[in-house]
Image (spheres, rainbow, N blue to C red):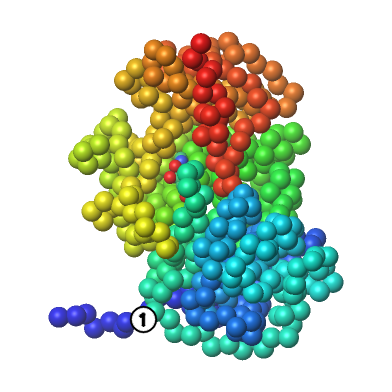
Amino acid sequence: MNGLMMQHPLQIADILCHAERWHADSEIVSRNPEGGIHRYTYRDAARRARQAANVLTALGVSPQDRVATLAWNTHRHYELYYAVSGSGAILHTINPRLFPEQIVYILNHAEDRVLFIDAQFLPLIEAVCEQLKFLEHIVVLAPEAAMPDTPLGVQSYEALLADAPDTYDWPALDEDSAASLCYTSGTTGHPKGVLYSHRSTVLHAWACTGRDVLNVGNDRTLLPVVPMFHVNAWGVPYSATMAGAKLVLPGAGMDGASLYELIEGEQVDMLLGVPTVWLGLLQYCEKENLKLNPVRDVVIGGSAAPLSMIRDFDEKHDAFVIHAWGMTELSPVGTVNNNSRLMQQLPRAERYALQTKQGRPVFGVEMKIVDDQGQELPHDGKAWGRLLVRGPWIARGYYKHEDCSAWENGWFDTGDVATIDPHGLMQIVDRSKDVIKSGGEWISSIDLENCAMGHPAVAECAVIGVPHPKWDERPVLLVVLKEGQTATDTDLLDYLSGHVAKWQLPDKVLFVNELPHTPTGKLLKRALREAYQNLLME
Ligand code: AMP
């Protein structure tokens, strides 16, 4: 016997309709790429999203066509999140930090017909436009008066919107139909497309609002610094809207000064982003002797949050770090380490250590660690294994791609190696390809980085496994020092030896001016491994 409940498909447009109806006056504040701060409400955003949907129709966009964006976190980009998916087309957000050849590849692979672009990124397209086989229209996200000079045939978003009617009936869509597309910048081969559905997007956003997840409520003010061109800014444009929270969008201003100005000016109480962004903000605050007064929570994911960052946010800014783990294939949120009964009982130092773990799975994500034979490993906090997941917002394949090697028996192999402790807290040990194999033992590069970051002179660091004639691989530590600080390799090794076993100590410490990052802000360890492959071979 079936239950007697209504069948109502989950649809992205309904999220904005809900905010318009019930949270109409909540604000969205956005730093305009052309200068100035833009401020409006969910009521205005919903009206402009309907206008944008009419623009799509006028441009000839049909259901399930791919519509690309190359844009910062702004109110215009936000409107497209709803206009494109809500009208039945597929929003394809492109990361402008990808190499030009990757941008060409994914625009062609997705067969994008229309591109909405911030003026700053136009040169990327000017350089490759002849290779773009499917692109018919380019719309610059700017008013007519701020349109840039370009040899490309382009139209102004604001001009198109001004001419578009503000009534539009969002179509009833199959909840399983595709809504958005995001390519992962894999370290080998072409980027692979993850195709989210309306259902997966709504469920994921819904889960994220939860008290023990990101705790997104109507009384909160969120600043997603995580870009809207990477995994839908962790779903924040949806979850904030669901809750009618105030949303603050930083545009192109990711530097410490610009972020601080927005945080103070808009009284932001929740920050979301990758560790490298917070390094910049924390350094800025330290230099200028500033406190992040309104901030209550800092959600950190994308790479491991170092203990020193967790401590700095707490001790200097009274802000609690919510460590989260996820990936593009997971929409992206998989686990969250929010304040728990366990944490509240611990003295600060022990709590910080616990916060370096990536936390428990959100309801909806099933998770296990397995050995090389696929046997499940115990939750003892010690056994390391491949981290497998499954659930309704986890990809079951890549878009137009045959490689399904990451899936086994309905589980997705994340490529991460992790432990799970008796409290159910998962901790990422490493990407499986970054674990350092030394004389039959494994060393976690993340562990060593975490320790080295605690040294007061270290701004950023990376640990890589370098081939060694006797031990197979040995760790090498690369360090960027904070401005005006000095330290020697012996200082760092002495410091580390207080925290890790002797056999895990790096064989060498190298000081560098900067470290390479991937387009999504992670350390590019492959490049480092290549550069230093012969370092220990003499
Ligand atoms: P992406 O799909 O580009 O978002 O990258 C996902 C990968 O980032 C994961 O598989 C992890 O290796 C890494 N990652 C994400 N969050 C964390 C975290 N909190 N700690 C350590 N690694 C993380």
Q: Secondary structure at mark 1?
A: loop
Horizontal arrangement in the rendering, residue 73 relative to residue 384 (left or right) = right
* Residue occupying the point 74% across, 82% down: 162
Horizontal arrangement in the rendering, residue 527 relative to residue 444 (left or right) = right
Residue 158 can be seen, yes or no: yes
Q: Nearer the viewer, residue 203 or 171?
A: 171
| Count of marks, rendered view | 1
Horizontal arrangement in the rendering, residue 51 relative to residue 177 (left or right) = right
**Residue 293, placed above or below residue 314:** below
**Residue 231, placed above or below residue 436:** below
* Residue occupying the point 57% across, 27% down: 531
Pinpoint residue 28: horizontal percent, then vertical percent: 65, 67
Indicate the amino acid at tag 1. His
* Residue occupying the point 62% across, 43% down: 277
Q: Nearer the viewer, residue 125 or 209?
A: 125
Pinpoint residue 407: horizontal percent, then vertical percent: 30, 52
Pinpoint residue 263: horizontal percent, then vertical percent: 68, 52
The residue that disc 1 covers is: 8
